[in-house]
Image: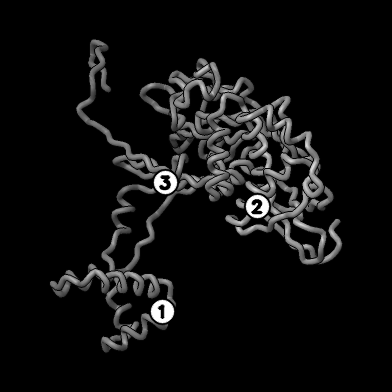
Amino acid sequence: RERDLTGWMSLSRKPEETWYGWDGDRLTTVQTQQTRIQTVYQPGSFTPLLRIETENGEQAKARHRSLAEVLQEDTGVTLPAELAVMLGRLERELRQGSVSEESQQWLAQCGLTAEQMAAQLEAEYIPERKLHLYHCDHRGLPLALISPEGETAWQGEYDEWGNLLGEESAQHLQQSLRLPGQQYDEESGLYYNRNRYYDPLQGRYITQDPIGLRGEWNLYKYPLNPVRFIDSLGLKFHVNGDPSDFNQAVEYLKQDSQMKETIDFLSSSEETINIEYIEGTNVRFNSNNMAIYWNSRASLFCSTELNSKSQSPALGLGHEFAHAQYYLLDKENFMALLSRTDKKYENKEEARVITIIESRAAKTLGECTRGAHSGLPFYRVDGPLQTMKITGTPE
């Protein structure tokens, strides 16, 4: 948009196009006519770690013809698709400096050597890139961009609801990431949250929750305590603390189709599921306050025998997801199963979850299955997806 001398604003005659690239629900690439900005995130979360900026001119220099293209264009012969695939594999091996025995054999059959083919490769150009590390708060909101030399290239100050109060950048960098999952839209002043738009001035969404009343009666609400909670997708699930371990566990569990159905059900339920991190081993679902208490470092062994393996903390979270889903589906029967004792699994609800849901997910994920509920030892691991093996008496 442009203003004339009278102050009249009109559309600019210089249209600009911006292309966006996504990895699942995370914005990873922003491409304009001048530059490409790529973002690397902390695994399993919406917290940005690294910003990579490449000028379009540098990208153009990095383009080169593939080995198959070189041979086709230089000889004027169209290569069969199968041969083009073989040449593509050979090119990757040549550039990595290690040619497989299979490639050497078919080259020899053609009377060629790897050295002759390497001479046909076009040189690779490594484009110049500007790298900056993100410094974020406990929610994943970017506070600063740090250069490899340790200098602050950009810094911003926000209020609790994500309003940008001020920013400084000696290099005139534009930093558009806001609260986890949000992208600043310059034209509207709103934050795009993948599923809808968020207005930081109001501290609420301006478009309805796409899942409707399954979310809850207030279709526009953002977490009422934005210092503790985030809503990275514009949907539901409140994590008390850093959501990285939780998000990583959820993505891991979704590899099992039944677990994915359970997670999708909870994400769109009328109830808000609160995830509370704990230090001990009393991992549980509490139906009174709709909370799951979870230790992302507590790994549960499948038996007490030597060389027994343990289940990941993520699978323990999936176990509690299964309890929460059944409670929401059939509260009366859920309570009835809890009250009925079981010799192996303590009660019938634990037997249902362990033998039907947990065991299936464990097999899908390549983890061990257990034949009991109580009396099994926990052990501390370094991450939500880790397992271990008993090589002696567990601590």
Q: Which of marks 2 and 1 is nearer the N terminus?
A: 1
Task: Give the image location of residue 386, x and y in percent.
Answer: 67, 55
Q: What element carries label 2?
A: helix
Number of residues whose C-alpha sits closer than 10 Å to that of mark 1, classed few (under 14), some (14–19) or many (20 or more): some
Q: What type is the residue that disc 3 sits on? A: Glu
Q: Which of marks 3 and 2 is nearer the N terminus?
A: 3
Q: Residue furthest top?
A: 6
Q: Distance between the residues labelled 1 and 3?
A: 33 Å
Between residue 31 and residue 205, name the one nearer to us: 205
Left or right placement of residue 31 versus residue 327 in this view: left
Q: What type is the residue that disc 2 sits on? A: Ser
Q: What element carries label 1?
A: loop
Picture layout, residue 161 above or below residue 369: above
Coloration of the structure image: one colour
Q: Distance between the residues labelled 2 and 1?
A: 43 Å
Q: Nearer the viewer, mark 1 or mark 3?
A: 1
* Residue, disc 1: 99
Between residue 353 and residue 221, name the one nearer to us: 353
Q: Quadrant of the N terminus?
A: top left
Picture layout, residue 235 above or below residue 310: above
Task: Give the image location of residue 69, x and y in percent.
Answer: 23, 67
Left or right placement of residue 228 versus residue 269 in this view: right
Q: Quadrant of the C terminus?
A: bottom right
Q: What type is the residue that disc 1 sits on? A: Val
Residue 359: image tag: 2
Disc 2 and disc 1 in contact, CB within 8 angstroms: no
